[in-house]
Amino acid sequence: MPNEADLLTNISDSGLRALANIALAPALQSRLNDLLFRQSSDELSSDESKELDSLIGQVEELNLLKARAEYTLRQNVK
């Protein structure tokens, strides 16, 4: 369950809205899609597998940041 430590308190509402809508850069999203497709066909090299893991980590970090921004915005409304 989220708590006060999850709030992004030093960011304006417009900044929070921007963070809540952030997405992976189009070139990185395209690369991620390609790697995921190739992984499903067992066509990834070891380096590509590491790259895929890194991109997935970036997506996870973005999703956490987005969630914190959305949570903070909801708390600011109360």
Image (tube, helix red, strand yellow):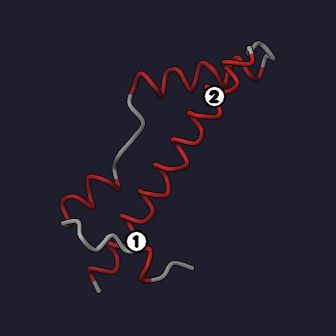
Q: Are marks 2 and 1 in contact (CB under 8 Å)?
A: no
Q: What residue is at 46 percent from the left and 26 percent from the top? A: 28
Q: Secondary structure at mark 1?
A: helix
- Which quadrant holds the C terminus? bottom left
| Amino acid type at mark 1 | Tyr
Residue labelled with disc 1:
71
Q: Position of residue 54 (x, y in %)?
A: 59, 34
Q: How many numbered marks, from 0 up?
A: 2
Q: Quadrant of residue 32?
A: top right
The image's mark for residue 50 is none
* Above or below 15: residue 48: above
- Please, which residue is most extreme toward the right here? 42
Looking at the rendered image, the disc whose residue lies closer to the viewer, 2 or 1, is 2
Q: Position of residue 62 (x, y in %)?
A: 46, 48
In this rendering, position of residue 29 left or right of residue 10: right
> Within 10 Å of the Cα at label 2, are there few (<14), some (14-19), or many (20+) other Cα atoms?
many
| Amino acid type at mark 2 | Leu
The image's mark for residue 52 is 2
